[in-house]
Image: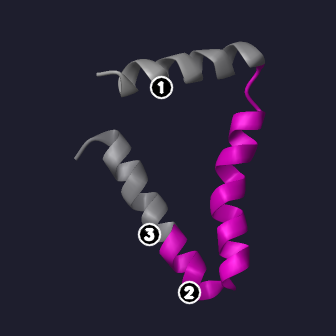
Amino acid sequence: MSKNAKIAAGGVAVGLILLIWLPWWAALLIVLGVPAAAYLTLDPSQRRRLRRATRKELGR
């Protein structure tokens, strides 16, 4: 299993645990808010590099 697959599986597991443990709206806020906050902490050059890499991978 690749590193990205392990991260994705861990994220799904955490999401399911949050849905059971918290109200659905709080779990949704956490699941969407953490990646958004991480993206916003990047400086503009890192955001450009991330967007450029994503577009290249989509074109394959």
> Which one is closest to the eye, mark 1 or mark 2?
1
Count neighbours of disc 2 (C-alpha within 10 A) and say few if under 14, some if 14 to 19, many if 20 or more: few
Q: Nearer the viewer, mark 3 or mark 1?
A: 1
Query: Of helix, strand and loop, which one carries label 3?
Result: helix
**Magenta stretch bounds:** 15-43
Residue 53 vertical position relative to residue 1 in the rendered view, above or below = above
Q: Secondary structure at mark 2?
A: helix
- Which residue does the image show at 22% across and 47% down from the upper left? 1
Residue 42 at what x, y percent from top left?
73, 27
Picture mark count: 3
For badge 2, the amino acid type reads Ile
Residue 22 is a magenta residue: yes
Sequence-earlier tag: 3 or 1: 3
Give the alpha-carbon distance from disc 2 to disc 3, as whole Å: 11 Å
- In the shown orientation, is residue 32 left or right of residue 10? right
Which disc is residue 13 wearing?
3
Depicted 42 relative to depicted 39: above or below: above
- In the figure, is residue 10 to the left or right of 49? left
Between residue 6 and residue 36, name the one nearer to us: 36
Q: Position of residue 2 (x, y in %)?
A: 27, 41
According to the image, label 2 marks what residue?
Answer: 20
Q: Kindly identify the amino acid type of the residue bearing the numbered disc 3.
A: Ala
Q: CA distance from mark 3 to mark 1?
A: 25 Å
Determine if the magenta segment contains residue 14: no
Find disc 1 in the rendering and name its residue: 54
57 relative to 20 in the view: left or right: left
Pick whichever of labels 2 and 3 is earlier in the sequence: 3
Q: Please say if 52 is above or below 7.
A: above
The residue at the point 69 percent across, 64 percent down is: 30
Place of residue 47 in the rendered image (x, y in percent of width and height, measured from the top left): 67, 22
Q: Quadrant of the C terminus?
A: top left
Going by the numbered disc 1, the residue's amino acid type is Thr
